[in-house]
Amino acid sequence: MIETIAAALSAHGLTLRGGFDFAGGEETPSGLSGGTARSVLLVGQAGANSCAEKKVNHGPSPLLSGRQPV
């Protein structure tokens, strides 16, 4: 699954920088589905092109709970 996520990110000029799984019994945040998160992935820019150069407003982001990105 990690390889699939990394490939999808790469198509948008992003890269998987790392991540971790929560330990059993550790307090975890809620995920987008409302269930508890089991892991966190860290995503960053890849290469010389910045995301700001490609920034296009596609409306509210589901990752930002409907808020507009900054």
Image (cartoon, helix red, strand yellow):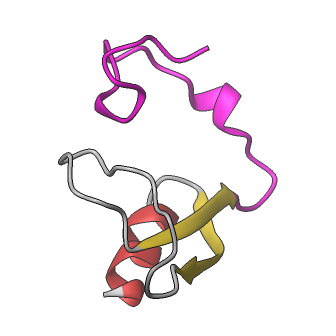
Height in image: 27 above or below 32? Answer: below
Q: Is residue 46 magenta?
A: yes
| Near-viewer residue (56 or 22) | 22
Quadrant that contains the C terminus: top right
Height in image: 64 above or below 7? Answer: above
Height in image: 42 above or below 2? Answer: above
Asked where in the image residue 67 lies, by quadrant, the reply is top left
**Label tally:** 0
Kindly identify the residue that appears in the image at 76 percent across and 61 percent down.
Answer: 47
| Near-viewer residue (50 or 37) | 37
Relative to 18, 59 lies left or right: left
Kindly identify the residue that appears in the image at 31 percent across and 12 percent down.
Answer: 59
Kindly identify the residue that appears in the image at 40 percent across and 88 percent down.
Answer: 3
Kindly identify the residue that appears in the image at 51 percent across and 79 percent down.
Answer: 22
* Image coords of residue 34 (percent x, y): 20, 46
The outermost residue toward the front is: 25
| Near-viewer residue (51 or 39) | 39
Quadrant that contains the N terminus: bottom left
* Image coords of residue 5 (percent x, y): 38, 74
Q: Is residue 48 magenta?
A: yes
Highlighted range, magenta = 45-70
